[in-house]
Amino acid sequence: MKITQLTVYPVKSLKGINVAQSKLHGHGLAWDRRWMLVDAQQRFVTQRQLPELATIAVELTDQALVLSHPKVEPIAIPLEDPQGNLRLVKVWNDHCKALPESEDVSHWLMAALGEQAQGISLVRFATEFTRTVEEDFLAGGEAHTYFSDGYPFLIATTGSLDALNQALVASGQSPVPMNRFRPNIVIDCDDAWAEDQWATLASQGSYELTLRKPCQRCKVTTVDQQTGTVPVQAEPLKTLLSLNTQPHLKGAHFGQNATLTAGQEGTIRVGDEVVSTHRET
C-alpha cells in the first residue's frame, strides 16, 4: 500500500493544504490545526455553524499564514507568536490556552463572510500548553493534539471512499470527493473498510502510527468543500449510516483516528510504502 495524499489543515475548518511531505510530530502533521476560529464566548467555530468557512483558502509561506477569499484581498498573519495575553478557549469539552491574533483578521473575516462572521476571532494554540487525547482508546499510553477534534491524525483509504460512492450512485446520489472527510493521510487500498481492522500503519524503519478509534462523522461531510454549500441535505451521512461499517457503534463512521507511536520528528511523504498490522480480535 502507498500514501497517495497528505493534507494539513493549519486553521481548523478552513481549506486544507495538500503537501508532498510533512514533518511528523506527536500532535500531528507540521502546522496541522495550529489555529482555530472562536466566537465571542471563546468557543470553537467550524463548518458545522458556518459552512462558508470552506471557501477560505490557506497558504503557508516561510514568514506567514495567508488566508484568501474571492471577495477580499488576502491577509498575511506572521508565523511569529503574537503578542498578547493568553486566552482560555474551548474545543468540544476541552479548555485550551491560546494566543489571540490581530483584530485585523476579525475585520477580514467580516469582509469575506459578512455579518455571520460577527464576533469571530482567530487564535493560535499556545504550545506551552498540552491538550491530551482521551485515554479510553490509548491502551495505557498517552498522546496530545492541538485544535483537532480529538486525535492528531485522521487516516482514510481510497477503497472505503470507492465503496461509499458506489452506494451513493446506486441510490441515485452523486459521488463525493475525499475532501468531504478532511483526512490527513490517504492510503491507496482496494479493500473497503480495511482500515477498521488495522492496529498499526508503518513505513519500515521510519515511523509508525497506531489506529485508535473509528471516526464518527458529522454534518461537515455534507458541505461541498469548494463552494461552502450543502448540495444534498444529509448526504453522504445518510448513505454512510446505512452501510453500518461499525455495527457495534452508533452513528456513521469513516476513517480512523490515529496517534504517532514511532518516528517523532521524522518525515512522511506521498508515495511512502506502508504496511499494516491487524487488530487482535
Image (cartoon, rainbow, N blue to C red):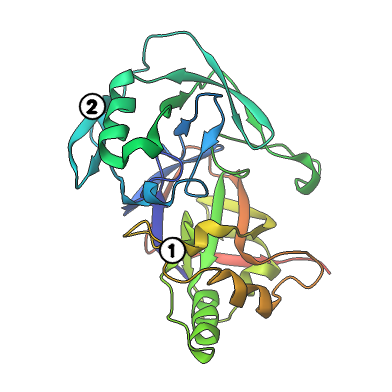
Residue at horizontal 80%, vertical 45%?
A: 136
Left or right for 199, reference 202: right
- Mark 2 neighbour class, 10 Å CA radius: few under 14, some 14 to 19, many 20 or more: few
**Location of residue 177 (image quadrant):** bottom left
Residue at horizontal 44%, vertical 67%?
A: 178
Left or right for 118, reference 205: left
Task: Report the number of numbered marks.
Answer: 2
Q: Earlier in the sequence, mark 2 or mark 1?
A: 2
Q: Which type of secondary structure does the marked residue at label 2 adopt? A: loop
At label 1, which amino acid type do we have? Answer: Val
Labels 2 & 1 near each other (Cβ < 8 A):
no
> Which residue bears the numbered disc 2?
63
Answer whether residue 59 is visible to the viewer in this image.
no
Answer whether residue 142 is visible to the viewer in this image.
yes
> Which residue bears the numbered disc 1?
230
Whole-percent x, y for residue 140 in the image = 81, 41
- Mark 1 neighbour class, 10 Å CA radius: few under 14, some 14 to 19, many 20 or more: some
Q: Is residue 42 above or below residue 47?
A: above
**Location of residue 146 (image quadrant):** top right
Which label number is shown at residue 260?
Answer: none
Q: Is residue 178 above or below residue 264?
A: below
Whole-percent x, y for residue 249 in the image = 78, 65
Whole-percent x, y for residue 129 in the image = 58, 20
Q: Quadrant of the C terminus?
A: bottom right
Residue at horizontal 72%, vertical 37%?
A: 142
Q: Which type of secondary structure does the marked residue at label 1 adopt? A: loop
At label 2, which amino acid type do we have? Answer: Gln
Residue situated furthest left in the rendering: 73
Disc 2/disc 1 C-alpha distance (Å): 35 Å
Instruction: Using the image as rendered, state which of residue 194 and residue 236 is in the foreground.
Output: 236
Residue at horizontal 61%, vertical 73%?
A: 238
**Location of residue 237 (image quadrant):** bottom right
